[in-house]
Image (spheres, helix red, strand yellow):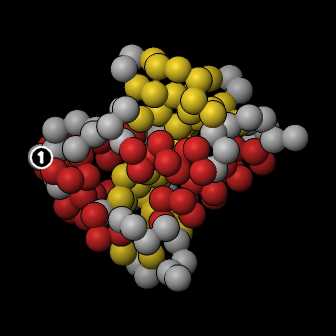
Amino acid sequence: MKALTIRRLRPSDAEALYRILSDRQVMRYLEPPYDRLQTEQFLREAGLAEPPLVYGTEADGRLLGYVIYHPYDPDSMALGWALSPDCWGKGYASRLTDRLVDLAHRAGKTAVIECVPEQTVTRHIAEKKGFAYVGRTDGLEVYRLPPNE
């Protein structure tokens, strides 16, 4: 199984990020597919922000997508992922979720995953990892992991 790295995004990731964010399958539950300018804006405002809202994930030097990891509320970190379709079904999202939950716990926080109701794979991962459905906010289903005890 490939080693996955979570790292800061770089300006040089713009082209690879564009290929991912312009893909209709990837963006199906997020937003309309991005053009190059929207991708560059997302990279600047979310990936290169201080602190970042998203980080890159790669394997073998190839950007596979990004992970969401930023404060949700004072006690929790929001987490998630957007991966290239050729990475789907290989356990990457599950492995990345484990890593992000571990980061949150080490920071003394719990974790939250938000998704639209149609994102059945995201819901499945959240439930498999022990997240509990806590309701809807702004049309998104919210799953919260109980505090690490």
Q: Position of residue 79 (x, y in %)?
A: 53, 42
Near mark 1 (Cα within 10 A), the count class, few <14, some 14-19 or many ≥20, is few
* Foreground of the two, 38 or 147: 147
Residue furthest top as drawn: 138
Tell me the element at label 1: loop
Query: 28 left or right of 68?
Result: left
Against 86, residue 148 (above or below) is: above
Quarter where residue 109 is shown: top right
Residue projecting furthest to the left? 35
Q: How many marks?
A: 1
Residue 24: where, in percent of width, then height?
A: 16, 50
Q: Quadrant of residue 75?
A: top right
Name the residue located 43 percent from the left edge and 58 percent from the top edge: 56
The residue at the point 24 percent across, 46 percent down is: 27
Q: Is residue 71 visible?
A: no
- Tell me the quarter of the image containing the C terminus: top right
Q: Residue at x 41, y 35 (%)?
A: 115
Which one is in front, 65 or 143? 143
Image side of residue 66 versus residue 135, left or right: left
Which residue is identified by label 1? 35
Residue at the image point whose x is 39% and y is 67% from the top: 89
Task: Say if 94 sits above or below 129 in the image.
Answer: below
The residue type indicated by label 1 comes to Asp
- In-front residue for pair 67/46: 67
Q: Is residue 89 visible?
A: yes
Please provide percent x and percent y for residue 10.
38, 58
57 displayed left or right of 132: left
